[in-house]
Amino acid sequence: MNILFLFLDGIGLGENNSEKNPFARAEMPYLQSLLGGQTLIQASAPFEGERATLLSVDPNLGVKGLPQSATGQSVLLTGINIPAELGYHYGPKPNPEVAQYLDGKTIFAKTVKAGKKAALLNAYPARYFEGIDSGKRLYSAIPLALTNAGLSLFTQADLYAGRALSADFTGKGWREFMALADSPVFEPQEAGEKLAELAKQYNFAFFEYWASDYAGHKQDMDSAINQLERFDAVLKGLLKIWRDEDGIILLTSDHGNMEDLSTRKHTAANVPLLLFGDKKYRREFQKDIHDLTGIAPAISRFLEIN
Ligand SMILES: [Zn+2]
């Protein structure tokens, strides 16, 4: 049984307001068909359909201030209420106090310890590793948790060999921003198919998408809509290849942002937890999830890695 954790940074469940919420405006026919004709907004949750479940999950965790990426991602990876223990939300990248939670206690570490296979399916370009090695760039929570578990980040060679995907799904970014004329490029639906094929090779696969948070900070409605419409096709490809009996695909976020483009800051909105897969798996998975801390224990239970 496998899990694919699809992490979209900075997407909350917002209002049905097309002035500020790209989710109220983007054409996402595939996702809507899974949600009984509804869009991905607060009023649509909770929902259970034939192939998808939508829950609304609180990322604030009883701590004042707006939720941030380092603590939010660390909560998703550990199930520990880190903001409550520290007394603050923190981000975007982990400080030493947050980083100490990302060694030994994460889903990546537990999967490895149980003798099962885990991977972060994003490929990272050479200049990312140069930044890390020179000390100019710090790991964000997810790569830090992965490397602490003794696993390696995928590289440009892995992207070319088809073992990993670009963070923008399609790979167009590598051609545009890294001047790699021969790098692999997929149509969005093909990228989703590829993601499913890769994920099935691991007990626990993770994919991190960050451009959604970026569009939120930039208050960029056009980019947000483009991203969501492209993602709808990715999802279609993904669920074409992933069969219900393969396990669970979960999609969630660390905090709201892109669902309210009237502010450049994060929001206090709940985040979506979308589950895809067999209905009985979904019901079992969701039963103790009340806020962001419930997700990691549900993964551990499902993979039997406690
Ligand atoms: Zn952010």
Image (cartoon, rainbow, N blue to C red):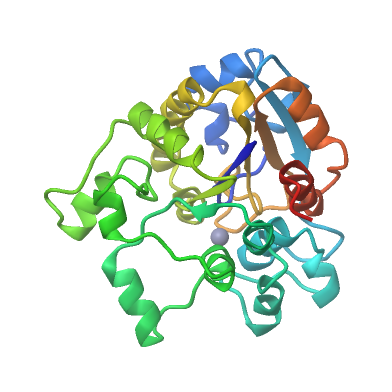
Q: Is residue 264 left or right of residue 304?
A: left
In this view of the protein, which residue sits in the foreground, 218 or 141?
A: 141
State the residue in front, 10 or 268.
10
Q: Quadrant of ligand 1?
A: bottom right
Give the percent coordinates (x, y) of residue 160: 24, 50
Is residue 176 visible from the viewing direction of this image? yes
> Would you place residue 267 above or below residue 68 in this image?
above
Q: Residue at x 56, y 38 (%)?
A: 20
Residue 71 locus on image (x, y percent): 69, 66
In-front residue for pair 119/80: 119
Residue 92: in sight, yes or no?
Answer: no
Report the residue at 86% width, 44% height from top. 290
- Quarter of the image where the N terminus is located: top right
Which quarter of the figure is the C terminus placed in? bottom right
Of 36 and 74, which appears nearest the observer?
A: 74
Q: Residue 144 sits in which quadrant?
A: bottom right
Is 105 placed left or right of 184 in the picture? Answer: right
Q: Quadrant of residue 187?
A: top left
Number of dots carrying numbers:
0
